[in-house]
Image (tube, helix red, strand yellow):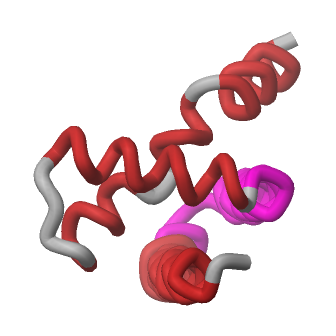
Amino acid sequence: LFGAIYFAGLAGIVIFLTFSSFCLVMFDLKFLESIKKSGKIVKKEYIATLGMSIIFFIILFLVEKVGGIFGGILEYLIVMPYLVIFLSEFVKISEKRFKKGK
């Protein structure tokens, strides 16, 4: 039940905020501008954003099951840095696509 509610919220509302912090920093935007930019990226790349969110949710869920110090090391030294790099590159690529008009 929790998974279904989480997925509905993710797919419906929260997903549009996925890139807002990246837009805020990478493009030096104001708070509301970064939310609008994130919404535009998600609107254009909805399926890709949803897929990434689900994949990283599953990865983090599995890492949490490992637990202990090894799980913490795995999460904060490996998974989270790759998540940040992956999402920032996705924002850069999406911005290039917007400029090209695709």
**Residue 78's image quarter?**
bottom right
Q: Residue at 16% x, 61% y: name it.
A: 29
Does the magenta portion include 52?
Answer: yes
Q: Which residues are magenta?
A: 46-72
Please, what is the dominant secondary structure of the magenta stretch?
helix
Image location of residue 4, percent across then percent down: 86, 19
* Residue 65 appears in the figure: no
Which image quadrant for residue 47?
bottom right
x, y (%) of residue 100?
61, 87
Asked if residue 90 is among those painted magenta in the image, a careful observer would answer no
Question: Does residue 14 appear left or right of residue 62 in this picture?
Answer: left
Position of residue 10 measured from the top left corner of the image (x, y, whole percent): 68, 32
Question: In percent of the image, x 77 and y 15: which residue is there?
Answer: 5
90, above or below 38, in the image = below
Observer-nearest of 44 and 70: 44
Please state, as top left, top right, bottom left or bottom right, where the C terminus lies in the image.
Answer: bottom right
Q: Quadrant of the N terminus?
A: top right
Across and down, in percent, residue 39 comes to 51, 45
Q: Is residue 80 above or below residue 5?
A: below
**Does residue 43 appear to the left or right of 77 in the view shown?**
right
